[in-house]
Image: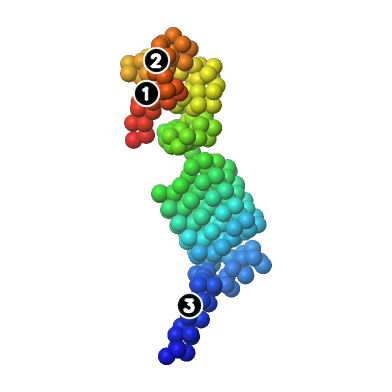
């Protein structure tokens, strides 16, 4: 009985130390040695920081593979299965992703400039700060507000800038950037953005937005009564958050 328990314990130890990998090791070796691996099984393969420029992975199974920070520039991934793959920071510039399935893939900070995205499936993919995808001002605004509410105004400003570059009349993006700039003690920039937001709200017939923006300008410039003692900055920013958060939904 004791020997059996010891044997089971050793098996458990080696199981934990050597977890089962799903990829076909022969296919992995083929990829690394020949750079030609169409229809290979590389599911769950660990290829972090791998140099895979111009490799042929047409129709390959890369489901849940970890390709974080890999260089796949110019690679042929047409028809590949990349569902749930970790593609954080991956370089896919000029890659062929025609018909590839990236459902649920993590593409944060990935670089896809010049990639062929014809018929590429991106359902539920995380494309935050992904370069090279068709722009969407509302998405950048949402990411900016998430950073704003988390207390990271610098990151928020980056995404507000993107939203504004895609939609010059996005009043709430200007107002959100105003709040972020105030958090960084850039009062002049905050007032300029809030005033632009007020003008846009007014031209768009949004009386509530106009009043929130003008009140922000007047409070920061001292035209309004100062906020109650002890409230300070948060009393100035709170009305902005209350007005801007509903635009996330």
Residue at screen point 44% across, 22% down: 232
The residue nearer to you, when weighing 3 against 166, is: 3
Name above or below for residue 111 compared with residue 58.
above
What is the C-alpha distance between the residues marked 1 and 3?
A: 57 Å
Mark 3 residue crowding within 10 angstroms, few (<14) / some (14–19) / many (20+): few
Residue 115 appears in the figure: no
What is the C-alpha distance between the residues marked 2 and 1?
A: 9 Å
Which SS class for mark 1? Answer: helix
First in sequence: mark 1 vs mark 3: 3
* Residue 215: mark in rendering: 2
Mark 2 residue crowding within 10 angstroms, few (<14) / some (14–19) / many (20+): many
Which SS class for mark 2? Answer: helix
Residue at screen point 49% across, 38% down: 134
What is the C-alpha distance between the residues marked 3 and 2?
A: 65 Å
Work out which residue is located at the far front of the displayed protein and give it.
229
Residue matched to label 3? 12
First in sequence: mark 3 vs mark 2: 3
The residue nearer to you, when weighing 153 against 72, is: 153
Q: Position of residue 82 (x, y in %)?
A: 48, 57
Residue 151 appears in the figure: yes
Name above or below for residue 121 compared with residue 249.
below
Which SS class for mark 3? Answer: helix
Q: Position of residue 118 (x, y in %)?
A: 48, 47
Residue matched to label 1? 239
């Amino acid at each position: 009985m004791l020997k059996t328990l010891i044997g089971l314990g050793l098996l458990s130890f080696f199981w934990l130390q050597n977890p089962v990998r799903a990829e076909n090791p022969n296919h992995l070796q083929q990829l690394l040695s020949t750079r030609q691996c169409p229809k290979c099984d590389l599911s769950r393969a660990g290829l972090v920081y791998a140099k895979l420029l111009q490799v042929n992975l047409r129709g390959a199974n890369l489901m849940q593979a970890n390709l974080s920070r890999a260089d796949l520039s110019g690679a042929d991934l047409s028809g590949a299965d990349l569902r749930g793959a970790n593609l954080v920071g991956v370089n896919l510039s000029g890659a062929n992703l025609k018909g590839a399935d990236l459902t649920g893939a993590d593409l944060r900070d990935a670089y896809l400039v010049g990639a062929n995205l014809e018929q590429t499936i991106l359902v539920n993919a995380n494309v935050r700060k992904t370069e090279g995808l068709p722009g969407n001002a509302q998405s950048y605004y949402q990411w900016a507000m998430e950073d704003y509410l988390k207390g990271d105004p610098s990151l928020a400003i980056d995404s507000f800038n993107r939203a504004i570059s895609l939609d010059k009349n996005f009043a709430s993006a200007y107002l959100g950037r105003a709040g972020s700039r105030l958090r960084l003690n850039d009062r002049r920039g905050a007032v300029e953005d809030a005033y632009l937001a007020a003008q846009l709200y007014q031209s768009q017939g949004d009386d509530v937005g106009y009043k929130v923006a003008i009140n922000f300008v007047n409070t920061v410039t001292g035209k309004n009564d100062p906020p109650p003692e002890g409230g300070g900055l948060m009393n100035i920013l709170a009305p902005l958050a209350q007005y801007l958060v509903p635009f996330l939904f």
